[in-house]
Amino acid sequence: LIYWRWGKLATSPRLTSPVSREGAFLFNNVVFLGLMFATFWGTVFPILNELVTGQKITVGAPFFNRVNAPLGIGLLLLLAVGPVMSWGKASRRNFQRNLRDPLIVSVVTAIVVTIAGVRAPFAIFTWAFCVFATGTMGLEVVRGVRGRMQRKQESPIRALLNLIRANRRRYGGYIVHVGVVLLFIGITGNLFARETQVSMKPGDVTTFEGYRLELKEIRHRYQPNYSAQLALFDVEGRGRTIQMWPEKRQYVGPRGETSTEVAIWSSLFEDLYLIFVSEDPDTGTAIFRFHRNPLVMWIWIGGMVMIFGGIVAIRRKGEQAG
C-alpha cells in the first residue's frame, strides 16, 4: 500500500517549528512507532532466539510494562497539548493561556489521588494527564459551541451537533481522543488488581476484597468429548448477591487437554473472576483462584468510543451546517 500510494504520500511543506500542531503530529507518530517496535520485538525476539540458538526464552508482561508505560504517558501528553497548538508555529502566549487551566486541574488531580493513598507513579501520572487531555479538548469544544451560539443563535445542544457536522474530522478526532483517555484509565486498573488462592469444601465461606463467597456444591458433568467439574458459588458484594459457576474441563483424546471456564462478574468499576483450579476426589476439597480486576469495563467503553469517533470522522458530509 505504501508503494502504491508513494506519490501521494510525498509532502512539500517543511516543519517550521516543533512547537506546532505539525510537530505534535510528528512526535505522536514517533511514539506510535516506538510502541509498535517494542511490542513487535518483544513478541518476535523469543522466536528468533530459538531459531538461532535453539534455546527457548519468554518475554513476559514486565518487559512490555517497563517499555510501553513511559511511551503511553508521552502519548497522553501529546494528546493533551496537540489540539491547542496552532499550525505553523504556536504562539507562546496563546499556548500558555490554553494550557493553564487544564494543567492546574491535572496537578490538583495528582495531589488528590496521592492524598487518597495511590502510590503507583504510573497511575498518578496517567490520571493527571487524562484530566489534562480531557480539559484541553473540552475547552476547545466549549469555545466552538459558544461561538456558534453567538453567531447562529442556537441552543447549546444544537450548536454542538452542528459544530460536529461542520467539521467531522476535527471533532470525530476529539471523540477518538476521549476513547483513548478512557482506555488509559482502564489500563491503570491493572495496577490495583488482587488475587488469592484458596482451598474450599462445599459449605465453606470465605471473603475476598469485600466479597463474601460461599461454595454451595461441586457437580460433575459428562459430555461426548469432555468431562467437567462445576462449582456453584453464592457471591455477595457491592449490594448484590449472584450465583457464579467456574468450570474445569478435561477433554477426551490422546493428549487429554484441560481448559478452564472462568466465571466473571463484570461491573463498571471492577470485574471479579472465579477460576476452578483442581479438585481432590478423595477429600472433596477443591482449589480456586479469585481475581479482582478494576476498571476493565473502561477499556471496552474506550474502544467503543474510539470506533464511534472514527465513524464520525470518516463519514461523508451531508448538507454543510453553516
Image: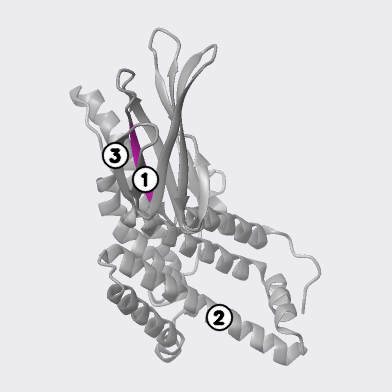
Residue nearest the viewer, comparing 127 with 267: 267
Mark sitting earlier along the chain (3/2): 2
Residue nearest the viewer, comparing 284 with 93: 284
| Disc 3/disc 1 C-alpha distance (Å) | 9 Å
Residue 289 colored magenta?
Answer: yes
Residue nearest the viewer, comparing 284 with 264: 284
Measuring from the top left, give residue 10's x and y in whole percent: 51, 57
The kind of secondary structure element at disc 2 is: helix
Residue 67 colored magenta?
Answer: no
Tag of residue 291: 1
Q: Tell whether label 2 touches label 3 (CB within 8 Å).
A: no
- Residue count near mark 1 (Cα–Cα under 10 Å), binned few <14, some 14–19, many ≥20: some
Instruction: Examine the rendered structure and indicate whether residue 58 appears above or below residue 282.
Output: below
- The amino acid sitting under disc 1 is His
The kind of secondary structure element at disc 3 is: strand
- The amino acid sitting under disc 2 is Glu
Residue named by callout 2: 140
| Disc 2/disc 1 C-alpha distance (Å) | 40 Å
Q: Is residue 91 visible?
A: no
| Predominant secondary structure, magenta span | strand
Front of the two marks 3 and 2 = 3
Q: Quadrant of the N terminus?
A: top right
Instruction: Please give the name of the residue rendered at 71% of the width and 92% of the height, measured from the top-left corner.
Output: 150
Measuring from the top left, give residue 201's x and y in whole percent: 35, 31
Magenta-highlighted residues: 287-292
Residue named by callout 3: 197
Q: Quadrant of the C terminus?
A: bottom right
- The amino acid sitting under disc 3 is Gln
Asked whether, in this view, residue 4 is left or right of residue 263, the answer is right
Q: Is residue 211 visible?
A: yes
